[in-house]
Image: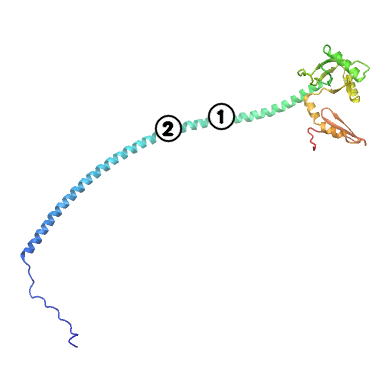
Amino acid sequence: MSSKQRPKQAPKAPDSPVVGPPTDTLAVASIMEAIKASEGSVLAKIEETVSTLSTDLHTKIESLSAELRQEINTVRSETREALETANRELKLHATSIRSLEEGASHYSDRVVELETQLTSLSSQVKQLSSKVEDLELRQRRDNCRIIGVEESLGDIRMERSVAKLLQDALGLDYTPTLDRAHRSLLPKPKQGDPPRPIVVKFHYFQEKMDVLRRALSRRPVLHNNKPIYIYPDYTAAVRKRRAAFKEARELLSHCPNTRFGLLFPATVSTFHLNGKLSHGKLERVHYPS
């Protein structure tokens, strides 16, 4: 091995420890004492500060706790009062609802009872209306209605004037016996308005039918060169039902080989030349325009 590659020798340790001067030891001791003294002072101050902070923290915590307890008690008191008020109102509402339910049940039973009575009364009213209509029509069996006679006729004795009018206008060989004759119960017309109809009650039903037949066969019937019209005196309901056939009668009047008539109370009767007779009851008739 060459001299360049030989390892270097480690330095030799000293034979005896080196001892420093005694002043260094004293300085270190004094420093340590100063550190300990300052450490105790710092610790005392920290403990004092911590104690002070702890006391303040406990005071604040107790103050906040007292405030929270007071607020919680206040909220509890208000909540309790609100709940008591709500419970009282709920009891009142429950009582009211129970009363309303009982009343509704009672009135429901009453409504059912009233509906039953209404159905019965409606049926009775319908029957009575039909009877009243029939009685009124029976009372009018001997009546006729004359339309188109001037208002000046019969200012003193209407019965004699109307009897004379019928005898002259229809060419009767007798004077009809009239029990009653009067204008319809309407306001007196103004100048230029059509005259009011005359309602006539015959004493004999046969004379009434004879007058109607002659009026039908002698159309138009003239009085003072003015046409007058003589019809049976029906009630307003029957006239309304018969008026529904106006258009149908106009159409039938233009049908060849056909004759028709309007029977009481509202029945259309048609007769064909082949001998076939047909009847039809129509309450309402609609025809294309």
Circle nearer the viewer, 1 or 2: 2
Say if mark 1 contacts mark 2, CB within 8 Å.
no
Which label was assigned to residue 103?
1
Q: Position of residue 14 (x, y in %)?
A: 9, 75
Left or right of residue 50, residue 123 in this image: right
- Please state, as top left, top right, bottom left or bottom right, where the C terminus lies in the image: top right
Q: Which residue is drawn at 13% across and 56% down?
A: 36
Q: Residue at x 64, y 28 (%)?
A: 114
To which residue does mark 2 refer? 85
Question: Image quarter for residue 11?
Answer: bottom left
Few, some or many residues within 10 Å of mark 1 (<14, 14–19, 20+): few
- Disc 2 on helix, strand or loop? helix
Amino acid on which disc 1 is placed: Gly
Q: Where is residue 134 in the image (x, y as percent from the top left)?
A: 79, 24
> How far, Cα to Cα, is label 1 from label 2?
27 Å
Amino acid on which disc 2 is placed: Thr
Q: Residue at x 38, y 35 (%)?
A: 78
Few, some or many residues within 10 Å of mark 2 (<14, 14–19, 20+): few
- Disc 1 on helix, strand or loop? helix
